[in-house]
Image: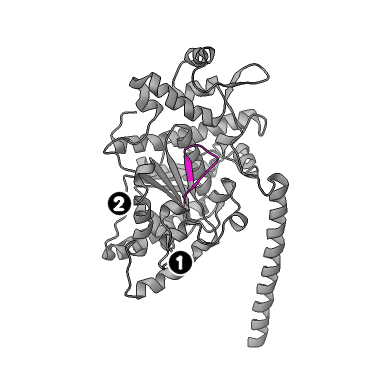
Amino acid sequence: MQQVASKSVTDTALKIGVYTSKLSAELRDMREAVYPPEARKTFTRTFSTVDLVRLLGVPESTLRQLTIEGKGPLPDRAENNRRTYTVEQVRELRAFLATLRPDHAGQLLPYRRRGEKLQILATANFKGGSSKTTSSIHLAHFLGLQGYRVLCVDLDPQASMTALFGIQPEFDLGDNETAYAAIRYDNERRSFQDVIRPTYFPGVDLVPGNLELMDFEFDTPNYLTSKTRDELGLFFERINTAIATVDDRYDFVILDTPPSLGYSTLAALYAATSLIITVHPAMLDVASCNQFLIMISDLSEVLAQFGAKFEHDFFRFLLTRVNPNDGPQKYMGGVMRRLFGDDVLVAEALESTAIAGAAVAKKSLYELEPGEVGREALKRALESADRVNFEVLALAHKVWGRST
């Protein structure tokens, strides 16, 4: 019997090895069909003057006058002769207008001010499929468009966030190029700054992830049993200590955690100044979320013995993939709001074909161009994402003591 079992395990391992080779080759071919080997993902969507009025809070007449006078970044003309701006020009326009309108510089360039601490937001859930990564990427892109300096840190070995930024984890990353490189325990550790990459999205940088992140889960037990210690501290302190080295470069850091409660997730929860738990309002998902909360509660008591405290400026549940016409979902959403009150965000992330279409194109809603998905579907999805993200931003402003 033992021989049969051993043969079965060996055959399965070989089969998995063959399958992963085949699938990796197919994914590489698919990727190269869309992006040639030397290609890099770019932000192709353009912005109209109507978009800029909403983003910058300036009258359209001001933008028109700047164009007439040849001041600031000069827009292109669309087929309908309307002025269009690239995402880089939107950011340039913020800086240019801030010099022209110093009284409004704080709104145009809303960077952290003296005394405002770095906001580190972790999105977390034990269950996959809760739109954790989707919520993270939408928040990052939203904040980038609002003029903030954002760092995304992909802590999930599956690296979905990394892929959405146009980096294929198994092809585009070498050894020691993820967050693991900055928190590992041996002498191959790199500085956190060394593993930060600029992205195609102005104002948003990335620390990518891939399967290498699993090594942190394997290395940590050995480190805990050894007597050696380094300047990054115990496992739960390491991400926080690494981020502190780039504190002055960013306004927001967004941590995309694995769908598990391993060492890296616990380190992310410790580093976070704020926590968002994404929950699909269905019975099994809510039950799984409850197990996640139980595990956090139990582990926090254990880690408290080492000085780890999970203290956050705000803690919120975000209801995701919500179908407002689904009775059972409406009921479970009501249960969450009844039990947790104001700790559930008022805004909900609606289920949308636009989000599914964006995922196929490896884009966020904020990158989609007209025509890539249905106009009305995109409009509703963007309105939903904006409501969620403006609510999160308002919470951060409250922490900073800002009125707007």
- Could you say which is closer to the camera, residue 46 or residue 128? 46
Name the quadrant containing residue 106. Answer: top left
Q: From what the image shows, is residue 18 above or below residue 320?
A: below
> Where residue 343 sits: x, y (%)?
36, 43
Callouts 2 and 1 close, C-beta under 8 Å: no
Main structural element of the magenta stretch: helix, strand or loop?
Answer: loop
Residue at 67 percent across and 34 percent down: it is 372
> Where residue 349 sits: x, y (%)?
51, 39
Name the quadrant containing residue 353. Answer: top right
Kind of residue at badge 1:
Glu
> In which quadrant of the rendered image does the C terminus lie?
top left
Per the image, the residue denoted by label 2 is 311
Label 2 CA crowd tier, 10 Å (few <14, some 14–19, many 20+): some
How many labels, in total? Answer: 2
- Per the rendered image, the range of residues in magenta is 196-205
Determine whether, in the image, residue 69 is placed left or right of residue 401: right
Residue at 43 percent across and 27 percent down: it is 95
Label 1 CA crowd tier, 10 Å (few <14, some 14–19, many 20+): some
> Where residue 223 sits: x, y (%)?
38, 71
> Where residue 65 sits: x, y (%)?
50, 12
Residue 217's mark? 1
